[in-house]
């Protein structure tokens, strides 16, 4: 049974423009359901700990028509998170950075998160992110000074998917930043898209790709566990 750390934005509010964002419900809950189905466990973290702000749009009828993710949110399972600075990264086999525009504001340049990502990566764990979740990976450097995504095939939320009313409020374009260092692919012709840039790096494109992203991560962790068991019993 693998341990996965899910990292959520604490939330961001622009009162002048009446704009509130945070983490996206489907991008947490769909992968968590896939991981738990495989017997893995998920811990939660956010910059300041406590109850992070969910993007209200992600719980709306438009994006959650069956109310599946709203029900999970209302159950309180995402109400308690550990401050990132207090996370013991070596306890985890993988890190999963949840999207939502909030990730671009408070996760992208968080040095404590970068440190956690590096520990997981350098100890052979999986680093994964979905939608806007790759934002902090763009700015994460390995201990030898190389960008963790440098030269890899990656995906994330495409420019053409961004709502026009939001674009001017964002601190940067995720697609543009990823293209500077990696082989970015939107795969717009596919309903869901998640890609392994290496054996340790997984990225997913958008909320609709969350189930596939979660399935890929869960199955890879199960596969790695089985290989470890086989080594042990040889």
Image (cartoon, rainbow, N blue to C red):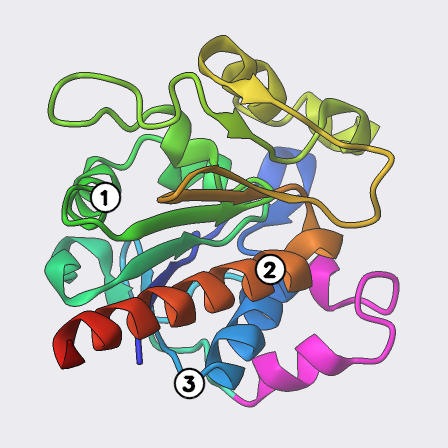
Reply above or below: 91 against 15. Answer: below
Residue identified by numbered label 1: 121
Q: Secondary structure at mark 3?
A: loop
Q: Which of the two labelled residues, at mark 2 and mark 3, occupies the earlier sequence position?
A: 2
- The kind of secondary structure element at disc 1 is helix
Residue 224 image point, x, y percent: 33, 64
State which quarter of the image contains the N terminus: bottom left
Q: Which residues are magenta?
A: 56-75
Q: Is residue 226 above or below residue 164?
A: below
Q: CA distance from mark 2 to mark 1?
A: 21 Å
Q: Is residue 215 magenta?
A: no
Secondary structure type for disc 2:
helix
- The reply, left or right, for residue 27 in relation to residue 198 is right
Please name the residue that numbered disc 3 is placed on.
Answer: 39
Find residue 13 and report its horizontal and vertical position in percent.
54, 45
Q: Nearer the N terminus, badge 2 or badge 1?
A: 2
Which residue was labeled with disc 2?
A: 27
Q: Quadrant of the C terminus?
A: bottom left
- The residues bearing labels 2 and 3 have C-alpha atoms spaced at a distance of 19 Å
């Amino acid at each position: 049974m693998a341990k996965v750390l899910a990292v959520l934005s604490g939330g961001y509010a622009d009162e002048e423009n009446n704009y509130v964002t945070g983490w996206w419900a489907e991008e947490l809950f769909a992968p968590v359901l896939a991981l738990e189905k495989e017997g893995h466990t998920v811990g939660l973290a956010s910059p300041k700990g406590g109850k992070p702000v969910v993007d209200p749009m992600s719980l709306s009828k438009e994006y959650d028509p069956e109310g599946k993710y709203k029900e999970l949110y209302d159950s309180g399972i995402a109400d308690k998170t550990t401050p990132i600075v207090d996370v013991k990264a070596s306890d985890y086999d993988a890190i999963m950075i949840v999207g939502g525009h909030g990730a671009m504001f408070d996760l992208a340049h968080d040095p404590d998160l970068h440190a956690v990502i590096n520990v997981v990566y350098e100890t052979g764990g999986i680093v994964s992110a979905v939608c806007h979740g790759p934002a902090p990976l763009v700015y994460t450097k390995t201990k030898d000074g190389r960008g963790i995504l440098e030269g890899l095939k990656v995906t994330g939320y495409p420019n053409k998917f961004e709502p026009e009313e939001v674009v001017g409020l964002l601190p940067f374009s995720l697609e543009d930043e990823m293209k500077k260092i990696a082989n970015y692919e939107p795969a717009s012709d596919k309903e869901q898209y998640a890609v392994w840039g290496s054996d340790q790096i997984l990225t997913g494109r958008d909320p609709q790709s969350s189930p596939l992203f979660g399935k890929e991560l869960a199955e890879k962790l199960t596969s790695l566990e089985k290989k470890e068991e086989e080594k042990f019993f040889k």
